[in-house]
Image (spheres, helix red, strand yellow):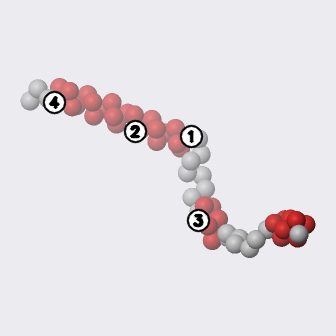
């Protein structure tokens, strides 16, 4: 029973800490664009850059 005197305040502090981090993430715009990174993966360009091809020709 004595452990509850430690665990209850510790859990309340932990809840406020988690709520504070969540509030900060909302205010800083962490959840503004949820779909953008998913589309960025699909639009990956695997072709070599034109600059790399011109540098290789210039070295020869």
Which residue position holds label 2?
18
Residue marked by disc 4: 4
Residue at position x 88%, y 69% from top? 60
Bin the neighbour count of mark 3 within 10 Å (Cα to Cα): few under 14, some 14-19, many 20 and up: few
Q: Mark 3 points at which residue?
A: 38
Please report contact status of discs 4 and 1: CB closer than 8 Å, yes or no.
no
The label nearer to you, 4 versus 1, is 4
Mark 3 vs 2: CB contact within 8 A = no
Tell me the distance, in whole angstroms, between the alpha carbons under discs 3 and 2: 27 Å
Q: Report, in whole angstroms, how far the alpha carbon at label 4 lies from the one at label 1.
A: 34 Å
**Residue 46 appears left or right of 50:** left
> How many angstroms separate mark 1 from mark 2 (CA)?
14 Å
Q: Where is residue 55 in the image (x, y as percent from the top left)?
A: 86, 65
**Residue 29 figure quarter:** top right
Q: Quadrant of residue 19?
A: top left
Please say whether residue 50 is visible from this viewpoint.
no
Which of marks 3 and 1 precedes in the sequence? 1
**Depth check, front residue: 59 or 11:** 59
Q: Is residue 59 left or right of residue 31?
A: right
Q: In this view, does 2 lie to the left or right of 30?
A: left
Residue at x 45%, y 35% (from the top left corner): 20
User: Is label 1 or label 3 in front?
Assistant: 3
Residue annotated with mark 1: 27
User: Residue at coordinates 33% horizontally, 34% vertically from top-left?
Assistant: 14
Total number of numbered labels? 4
Residue 40 on image: x %, y %:
64, 65
């Amino acid at each position: 029973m004595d452990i509850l005197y430690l665990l209850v305040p510790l859990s309340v502090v932990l809840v406020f800490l988690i709520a504070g981090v969540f509030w900060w993430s909302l205010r800083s715009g962490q959840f503004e664009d949820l779909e953008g990174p998913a589309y960025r993966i699909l639009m990956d360009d695997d072709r070599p850059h034109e600059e790399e091809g011109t540098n290789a020709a210039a070295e020869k």
